[in-house]
Image (spheres, rainbow, N blue to C red):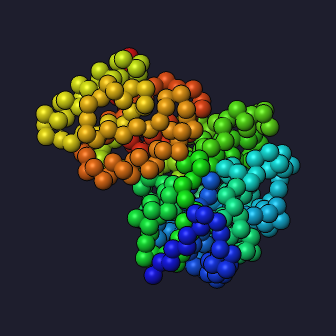
Amino acid sequence: MTIIIDAKEGIDYEKLEKAALILREGGLVAFPTETVYGLGANALLKDAVDKIFWAKGRPQDNPLIVHISSKEMLEICAEITDERVYMLIERFWPGPLTIVLPKKNVIPENVTAGLPTVGIRMPANKVALDLIRLSGVPVAAPSANVSGKPSPTEANHVIEDLMGKIDIIIDGGKCSFGLESTVVDLSGKKPVILRPGAISYFALKEVLSDIEYSKTMVEGLTGTVPRAPGMKYKHYAPEANLIIVKGRIDKRIDKINEMKKKLEFKGHNVGILCFYETAHNFDSQYKLILGSMFDAKECGRNLFSILRKFNQFSVDYILCEWGNFDLEFLALENRLYKAAANNIVEVL
Ligand code: TXA
Ligand code: MG
């Protein structure tokens, strides 16, 4: 049985302490963070961590992020081989940045999928921080969705995916960012961004001037071996076939309307995913708006819940417009491309 704790209007510490105890003793607790909901287990207990892979149906070779509530916990889990880690922490923690470092032996192999490194982050959400602090242990937590589905940005999404499979779901309302943390690898010679996320390249560059993107990162699903193993799987996917139509505004609008007509003629239900500014160009009962095309943050907050909403429409295809946006949109673009399994139609 899964217990739901309501923490939308504030925290009942008696209940949170119980959840922390269950977490510490090997149970599974889903909790809100500022990015997406996490599915937490005591990161020091191999058997507890195994339950995460079971509940999510997650491939065993995809490592988990360890969530901590203090600098002391960081030093328990990881080797600090690069002093610059403290510069990143100073600037971005608590917050949506995961740092990959050489792991210490207390972290079981299943947390890191056998890798010699561990990804660590201190979340900014108060419920998350208090839960970890009260449990007294580092908490391994992937996003709290069934593997392959869009990440959960509200408790209902977690309920949809994991009800009956885990011990507790803490409902902290909607996540403020809605896209996962940026993952930075500091275990090698040069700092590398393995996954774009809530913290932008520019913000990171101000602290680490030599930081680079991993070459395989944006390519996502294409052949090469990814350094963040999670990047190679089909991800975030709605049940319908998602097709991205990318190009100049006028061209992509025409293309989408043309594709929609053809698909409808064949008897398919077609959804449209568009921006406020362009929505009036599409005539569809299955039209959802991502946000403003000038506001990457707003679109990021909405993406995952919109992909889930399309499932309720039972459409066969979703045609999503996209443009040549700047780096502010990179994290969003990365998730969208993965949700579409790189199914992109470019119009020039
Ligand atoms: O915002 C987030 O990061 C959320 C919340 C819950 O904190 N968590 C999250 O976890 O997105 P998950 O499991 O869905 O994604 C973890 C990503 C994967 O792409 C994984 O491959 C990568 O981080 N990762 C974890 N440990 C790693 C390591 N040691 N080396 C390289 N990549 C790692
Ligand atoms: Mg995930």
Q: Is residue 126 above or below residue 45?
A: above
Residue 81 image point, x, y percent? 83, 53
Between residues 321 and 120, which one lies in front from this camera angle?
A: 321
Looking at the image, which residue is at 74% across and 34% down? 205
- Residue 314 in the image: state x and y as whole percent: 25, 51
Q: Quadrant of residue 109?
A: bottom right
x and y, in percent, of residue 176 in the image: 59, 49
The residue at the far front in this view is 9
In front of the other: 38 or 4: 4
Pick the front one: 139 or 81:
139
- Asked if residue 162 can be seen in this view, the reply is yes
Residue nearer the viewer, 29 or 291: 291
Residue at 71% from the left image edge and 64% from the top image edge:
129
Q: Is residue 129 above or below residue 27?
A: above
Q: How many marks?
A: 0
Q: Which residue is found at the position 44% from the left and 60% from the top?
A: 157
Residue 297 x %, y % = 57, 38
Give the residue at x 54% y 39%.
298
Q: Which quadrant, please, contains the C terminus?
A: top left
- In the rendered image of this protein, does residue 273 appear above or below residue 147? above
